[in-house]
Image (cartoon, rainbow, N blue to C red):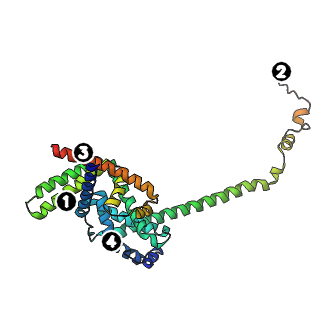
Amino acid sequence: MYPMQGGNDKLDSLLQAYREACPDREPSANFMPGLWRRIESRRNFTFSFQRMVRSFVTVAAAVTIAIGVYVSLPRATPASEVTYLEALAEANSLDTPENVGPVRLELNEAGR
Amino acid sequence: MLVDFELVRRAQHGDSAAFNEIVLAYRKRTMGTIGRLIARTEDVEDVAQEVFLRLYFSLDQLRAPEVFEPWLYRLTVNAAYDYLRKQRRRPEFRMSDLSEQQVMMADAVAGGKAEHDQQQKKKLRETVDSLLGAVSEADRVLLLMKEVEGLSLRELEKIYRVKENALKVRLFRARQRVLKAFETAERKNENG
């Protein structure tokens, strides 16, 4: 394993040299203003998004309440207390003359 | 720690001045780490800003100021890793940039010692960069954090939140791959 060991040492030296070739860098004068600009931009975006979510939740709550009211209103009307069969019977009663009255023939001049 | 815990606590509670002080204390070191991880000097500042941007919006998730440094390293590693992944998706961009740099470097050679040193360093960076091409971006970052940044396995365990043994295995495999690429390159140089 000597050749490998030699390779290991060389690789270590190479990485050490790499460390020295890439020292810590001085940031530019624009670093802090640029960073705060990015923070503000992200913060504004987050704020707008939160506001949008809040609006959406408010609208959703209002719609839910409206639907609730709409659904509960018809139950309060008297019409809903009459069943379908009762309504049908009332509309087509057997006592009505249209159904059980005598047939009336209207003869005109031509039929005579 | 380059700053005291109280400053971190104040920044966690939304004190912008405290956050500013933290950035001023850590930005040089963070930029150095990023420079060694991504090997592209022109994008270092941008990635460093991204690190501090993430720090600003995640400080409230930090459980204790005592783990601030591993936390910052973790953000640095993640940002560098994200950058490297994006670069891999745009290889033609990177190659064209490199060749442009090489052309500029060739034009700038005036025979002075400073230029010569710069060129040597640049060549060294390119050599290491190409050797580390033998491993994935994740392994590249891990290997550099251990071998170049000099972090211990215990520190890496805190940053990666992975057991020390798993890290050892991963590092060993990554190193073997780089070593193999290194020896192949050396043989090629000897023969050529």
Residue B184 is tagged as 3
Residue B129, how many percent across, how many down? 26, 53
Residue B121 is tagged as 1
Q: Is residue A16 above or below residue B22?
A: above
Secondary structure of residue under mark 2: loop
Residue B49, how many percent across, how many down? 35, 65
Q: Where, quadrant-wise, is the C terminus of chain A in this rendering?
A: top right
Q: Amino acid at mark 2?
A: Gly
Number of disc labels: 4
* Cα distance between the residues tagged 1 and 3: 22 Å
Which of marks 3 and 1 precedes in the sequence? 1
Residue depth check, mark 3 versus mark 4: number of the one nearer the observer:
3
* Cα distance between the residues tagged 4 and 1: 28 Å
* Cα distance between the residues tagged 3 and 4: 44 Å
Q: Amino acid at mark 3?
A: Thr
Q: In the image, what residue occupies the spot 83% across and 50% down?
A: A81
Pointer 2 local density, CA inside 10 Å: few below 14, some 14–19, many at least 20: few
Badges 2 and 4, same chain: yes
Which residue is at the front of the view, B180 or B88? B180
Residue B186, how many percent across, how many down? 21, 48
Q: In the image, what residue occupies the spot 37% across and 52% down?
A: B172
Q: Badge 2 is on which residue?
A: A111
Q: Amino acid at mark 1?
A: Lys
Which residue is at the front of the view, B190 or B32? B190
**Left or right relative to B151: residue A58:** right
Tag 2 subunit: A
Secondary structure of residue under mark 3: helix
